[in-house]
Amino acid sequence: MSYIKAGTDASGNDIKLFYQDLGGSNVRSTVVLIHGWPLSHEMWDYQLAELPAHGLRVIAYDRRGFGKSTQTWDGYDYDTLADDLKAVLDTLDLQNVTLVGFSMGGGEVARYMSRHGGARVSKVAFISSVTPYLLKTDDNPDGVDQSVFDEITENIQKDRADFLQTFGKQFYGVNLISKPVSQAHLDGDFARAYVASHKATLACANSFATTDFRNDLTQIHVPTLIIHGDADKTVPIESSGELTANALPNAHYIIYDEAPHGLFVTEKDRLNDDLLAFIQEGVTVRESVGTTTLY
């Protein structure tokens, strides 16, 4: 198995991030997929099966605390998570990267671009993303009420297994009539989510609920793709996709009609096509702060 070192914990133990690296090592375009909460990199199953077939190098890793990565006690704030992403890009010496962040992962994309100057990144994509700021406040009236996040915390603390199973249905828009994914898929997601640490699950929920990415978005100066489903009940489009698109008026914004949060499965073919179309266009690559190279 492949791991990247992302620093050490308070006891001096290595923090290791598990990753998959698919496709050729000499291709001109590299994609880094950043998973959502409360899953692991395995949520990208359909993308990992398709994108490398088109000449792309595709890397997906497990956030600390999730999947096969180290279950640290702390470090679930977005500054640290952006630094973990930097460790992935630097250790593998990736260039001309398209960052694709789903849901919570969109926050890592935004924070990386501002905190690390967009180094090594040529394009970014926000898929069902939590940006720009989920929490409803006086200066963010379209956000989500604090009570919603309080209920998530309470339910995780009360019975994490039951919460994850219930949450999984909302994730894909499953109800008495609509069955966009199978019970087998829901069972697989539960297994992927339950292997995460209790602390990571709680701490990351707090991070994506309370972190303000509005300033981070102003630091994005590369081609950007925004995709969001207008039936997303987990990260409502009015509180996220619409506002992210307003903050990035030059971005390519695609609304998936009647798509739920988990559109990487329910709309997998369309998403793969849209990602490929976006990634394979010519771009201006930002190697580091203040330096650009045309490919």
Image: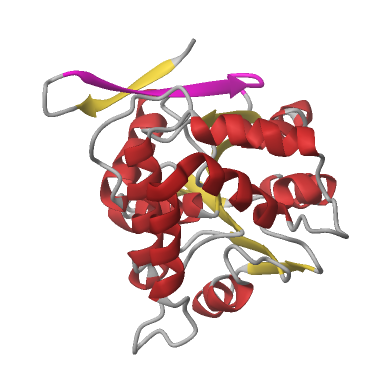
254, above or below 181, in the image: below
Residue depicted at x 51% and y 59%: 222
Question: What secondary structure do most residues of the magenta stretch adopt?
Answer: strand
Q: Is residue 181 magenta?
A: no
Horizontally, is 55 left or right of 133 in the view? right
User: Which coloring applies here?
Assistant: secondary structure
Residue 259: where, in percent of width, then height? Answer: 77, 62
Q: Quadrant of the C terminus?
A: top right
Residue 60: where, in percent of width, then height? Answer: 55, 31
Q: Is residue 22 magenta?
A: yes
Q: Which residues are magenta?
A: 13-26
284, above or below 219, in the image: above
Camera-side residue of 204 and 245: 204
Camera-side residue of 200 and 225: 200
Residue depicted at x 48% and y 35%: 95
Residue 40 seen in the figure: no
30, above or below 12, in the image: below
Camera-side residue of 84 and 96: 84
Residue 131: where, in percent of width, then height? Answer: 47, 65
Residue 11: where, in percent of width, then height? Answer: 11, 22
Residue depicted at x 25% and y 41%: 75
Horizontally, is 253 left or right of 134 in the view? right
Residue 159 seen in the figure: yes
Q: Residue lying furthest left in this view?
A: 11
Q: Residue lying furthest right in this view?
A: 177
Horizontally, is 126 left or right of 204 in the view? right
Quadrant in the picture for residue 229: bottom right
